[in-house]
Image (spheres, rainbow, N blue to C red):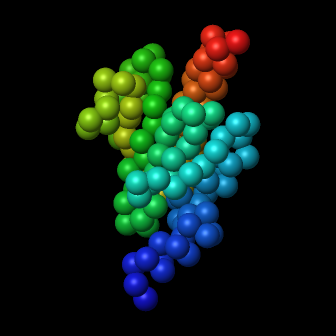
Amino acid sequence: MGRGRKLRRTLERGGSGPALRLNETLGGWTGVRITPMFGRWGYFVGETLFACFPLRDKERDLWIRLSPQDQRRALADARIRPHRRFGRRGWIELDVEAPEDVGRALRWLRRAHTAATRGAHASENAEA
């Protein structure tokens, strides 16, 4: 079976492993749109990307965009690191390997979703 077929099946199912659980949970949140992009699942509120997770099963680095205060709080955890390229923009990275990692990730994702929702509402109000 070629790589393309396996990837298409993963996309049709909505992910596999931790990605499936993240996609099912985030898909139920208000205003969240999940789109595969550049080899990752992109999690959006409106046009704002607030997180992304790899499509491939072997990769497990979740990227989350947080407010500056939440980023400082998250980086106090030794398992969380600043994003290698976008750390100054509020992005963090954490590995999601085990079920307990998904729970921890969802707590940070909830904060990122809240910040993105506030930002989406602020930009809508500015346009009006």
Q: Residue 74 vs residue 81: left or right?
A: right
| Quadrant placement of the C terminus | top right
Res. 119 image quadrant: top right
Identify the image quadrant of residue 20. Answer: bottom right
Q: Residue at x 37, y 60 (%)?
A: 59
The answer to whether residue 77 shows anywhere in this view is no
x, y percent for residue 15: 56, 64
Residue 58 to residue 63: above or below: below
Classify residue 23 as left or right of residue 38. right
Left or right of 39 on screen, residue 126: right
Image x and y of residue 113, in percent:
60, 32
- Choose between 11 and 60: the one closer to the eye: 11
Q: Residue at x 42, y 65 (%)?
A: 56
Question: Which residue sits at x=41%, y=58%?
Answer: 39
What is the x, y in percent for residue 71? 41, 24
| Quarter of the image that includes the N terminus | bottom left
Q: Is residue 24 visible?
A: yes
